[in-house]
Image (spheres, rainbow, N blue to C red):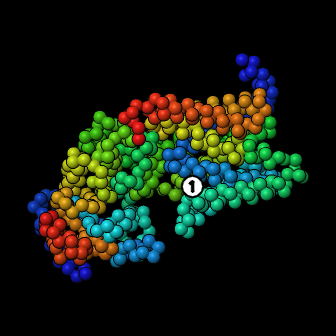
């Protein structure tokens, strides 16, 4: 049993990808909690799909992939907000349109350039633990530090804004700037997660661990902390699963996270399907 | 329709209120002046040339039929809805330039009550601006929040998740948030929706206290029943100001008929 855990660690690529997985499991749960409490889970999906064209263009142009993906993600968010405010189209439809369009553009671009560049579309879509370099570890660590620092420093403002945006605006908080900051954090987090889980399944790490924690604790900081724990555990387990069973890391991580959610869904003391007190049924 | 307004405004300048002391203490705070406010929802003209003053030291209610634009007026004053024309001034400058002095209790339906926060978390939101960026809450802030919780009778519920409180308790927590904010202007959008009698009593007690301290208290009020008696002043709205000023003057049948049509005559008689 111990051997199952130790053996993969002989390989440097596995050490690198585990470090990335831990960081990503942590920050995804933290920023994902904000999506969860604002009922904007689908926005996480839209942003993650929006990064794909930027990734392709950055690869083709030879600039830092993280920068290209981040700019592309922010462009996607901006267009969603633009469609929503300038037309009668509601947010969910705007997200659907942007998500599918950016994803289609990304797949097209990557297909066009992959012959000449020895890259694989599947790695972008589902993650590729083998491809994690020390440079990626460094970039992911920098992003993780930025994300954690910003959330810590703006915790009370973001709590107020995500709970009661109008009350926060009336009290004089710069709600547009806070919203932009939050979207930037989510884009950064998605970008950091690409190698580990890929574009399609980032949502699993953004939403599922936070949702699991939401069933177990009652305060945002605890949802974040417990969610981060669950996210890290899911990432690590998924990585090992990926190593031993030879499946892409993204789906493995997503399935483990779903397993934790199922347990909480069934057995949460407060809301569990099988364990909740009758009076708490809502 | 608004021809009779000036006379009403004149009579309401403190003459009808026996508690003269309150008016004296109100000197520090200027009235809020709404000037020619127009609001559109796409093609719908939701508010038309609304000009009205909200005085300090009084409890003022915005009253009118469904769709009259009561919440719209409040939100436009607060900058939550853009106004096509007009301005809202307070003292030397605009109301929105002095946001740190404003507190707002939104309609209950606008809040997600399953949000993972405790009553304490919500009350502390009232201290976010005072605490300042990148800082933790000070001991002063914590004391202000404790005092606010006590004032609304919710000190024993500080650590409860908001989702586990009753509607009235939730409203009292929001009131405590506004108190903790130590604002000079308090806007409430239908504060009585879904609350119990106890909360109603606590709410009006505190609103009257705030008014007596010389603050500006404005509430959208849905109900023409006995609770309207709690207001000193009324703004009667139906997309435009039908009348405004001292409650009993505004609620006379002539204005009520203009605002509500014929059926409201009896209500007005009962209320006045």
Residue A203 in picture, x, y percent from top left: 63, 45
- Residue A152 lies left or right of residue B49; in this view the side is right
Does residue B189 lie above or below A274 as drawn? below
* The N terminus of chain A: image quadrant: top right
- Residue A124 lies left or right of residue B26; in this view the side is right
Q: Secondary structure at mark 1?
A: helix
Residue furthest to the left in view is B18
Residue B267, visible in the rendered structure: yes
Residue A113 in picture, x, y percent from top left: 85, 55
Does residue B68 lie above or below A267 as drawn? below
Residue B36 in picture, x, y percent from top left: 35, 76
What chain does mark 1 sit on? A
Give the residue number, with chain letter if any, for mark 1: A180
Please tell me which residue is depicted at 32% across the width and 50% down the height of the picture: B178
Please tell me which residue is depicted at 89% across the width and 52% down the height of the picture: A116
Depth order, front residue of A256/B110: A256
Task: Report the number of discs.
Answer: 1
Residue furthest to the top in view is A2
Residue A192 in picture, x, y percent from top left: 69, 43
Depth order, front residue of B173/B7: B173
- Residue A157 lies left or right of residue A198; in this view the side is left
- Residue B205 lies left or right of residue B79; in this view the side is left
Q: Quadrant of residue A108?
A: bottom right
Q: Quadrant of residue A109?
A: bottom right
Does residue A3 lie above or below B196 as drawn? above
Depth order, front residue of B43/B157: B43
* The C terminus of chain A: image quadrant: top left
Residue furthest to the right in view is A116
Please tell me which residue is depicted at 50% across the width and 43% down the height of the picture: A155
- Density class for disc 1 (Cα within 10 Å; few <14, some 14-19, many ≥20) is some
Residue B51, visible in the rendered structure: no
Please tell me which residue is depicted at 39% across the width and 33% down the height of the picture: A278
């Amino acid at each position: 049993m111990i051997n199952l855990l130790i053996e993969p660690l002989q390989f440097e690529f596995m050490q690198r990808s585990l470090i990335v997985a831990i960081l990503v499991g942590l920050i995804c749960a933290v920023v994902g909690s904000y999506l969860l409490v604002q009922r904007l889970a689908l926005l996480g999906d839209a942003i993650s799909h929006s990064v794909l064209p930027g990734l392709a263009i950055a690869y083709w142009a030879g600039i830092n992939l993280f920068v290209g993906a981040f700019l592309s993600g922010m462009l996607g968010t901006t267009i969603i907000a633009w469609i929503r405010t300038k037309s009668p189209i509601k947010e969910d439809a705007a997200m659907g349109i942007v998500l599918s369009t950016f994803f289609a553009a990304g797949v097209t671009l990557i297909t066009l350039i992959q012959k000449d560049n020895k890259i694989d579309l599947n790695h972008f879509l589902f993650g590729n633990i083998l491809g994690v370099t020390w440079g990626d570890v460094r970039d992911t660590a920098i992003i993780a530090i930025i994300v954690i620092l910003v959330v810590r420093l703006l915790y009370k403002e973001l709590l107020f804004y995500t709970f009661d945006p109008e009350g926060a605006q009336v009290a004089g908080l710069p709600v547009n700037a806070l919203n932009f900051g939050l979207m930037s954090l989510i884009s950064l987090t998605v970008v950091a997660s690409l190698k580990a889980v890929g574009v399609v399944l980032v949502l699993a790490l953004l939403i599922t661990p936070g949702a699991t924690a939401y069933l177990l604790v009652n305060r945002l900081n605890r949802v974040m902390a417990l969610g981060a724990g669950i996210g890290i555990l899911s990432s690590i387990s998924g990585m090992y699963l990926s190593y031993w069973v030879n499946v892409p890391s993204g789906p493995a991580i997503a399935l483990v996270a779903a397993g934790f959610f199922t347990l909480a869904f069934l057995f949460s003391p407060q809301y569990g399907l099988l364990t909740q007190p009758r009076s708490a049924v809502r | 329709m608004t021809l009779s307004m000036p006379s009403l405004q004149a009579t309401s300048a403190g003459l009808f209120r026996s508690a003269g002391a309150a008016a004296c203490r109100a000197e520090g705070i200027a009235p809020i002046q709404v000037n020619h406010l127009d609001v559109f929802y796409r093609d719908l003209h939701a508010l038309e040339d609304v000009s009205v003053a909200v005085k300090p030291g009084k409890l003022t209610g915005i009253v009118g039929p469904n769709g009259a634009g009561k919440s719209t007026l409040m939100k436009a004053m607060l900058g939550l809805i853009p106004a096509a024309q007009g301005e809202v001034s307070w003292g030397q400058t605009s109301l929105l330039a002095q946001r740190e002095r404003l507190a707002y209790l939104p309609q209950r339906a606008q809040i997600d009550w399953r949000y993972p926060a405790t009553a304490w978390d919500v009350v502390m939101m009232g201290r976010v601006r005072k605490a300042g960026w990148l800082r933790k809450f000070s001991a002063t802030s914590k004391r202000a929040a404790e005092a606010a919780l006590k004032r609304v009778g919710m000190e024993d519920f500080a650590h409860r998740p908001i989702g586990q409180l009753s509607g009235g308790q939730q409203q009292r927590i929001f009131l405590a948030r506004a108190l903790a904010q130590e604002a000079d202007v308090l806007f409430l959008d239908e504060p009585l929706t879904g609350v119990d009698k106890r909360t109603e009593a606590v709410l009006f007690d505190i609103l009257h206290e705030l008014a007596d301290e010389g603050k500006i208290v404005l509430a959208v009020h849905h109900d023409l029943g006995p609770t309207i008696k709690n207001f000193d002043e009324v703004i009667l709205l139906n997309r435009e100001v039908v009348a405004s000023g001292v409650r009993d003057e505004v609620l006379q049948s002539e204005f009520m008929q203009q605002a509500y049509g014929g059926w409201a005559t009896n209500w007005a008689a009962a209320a006045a």
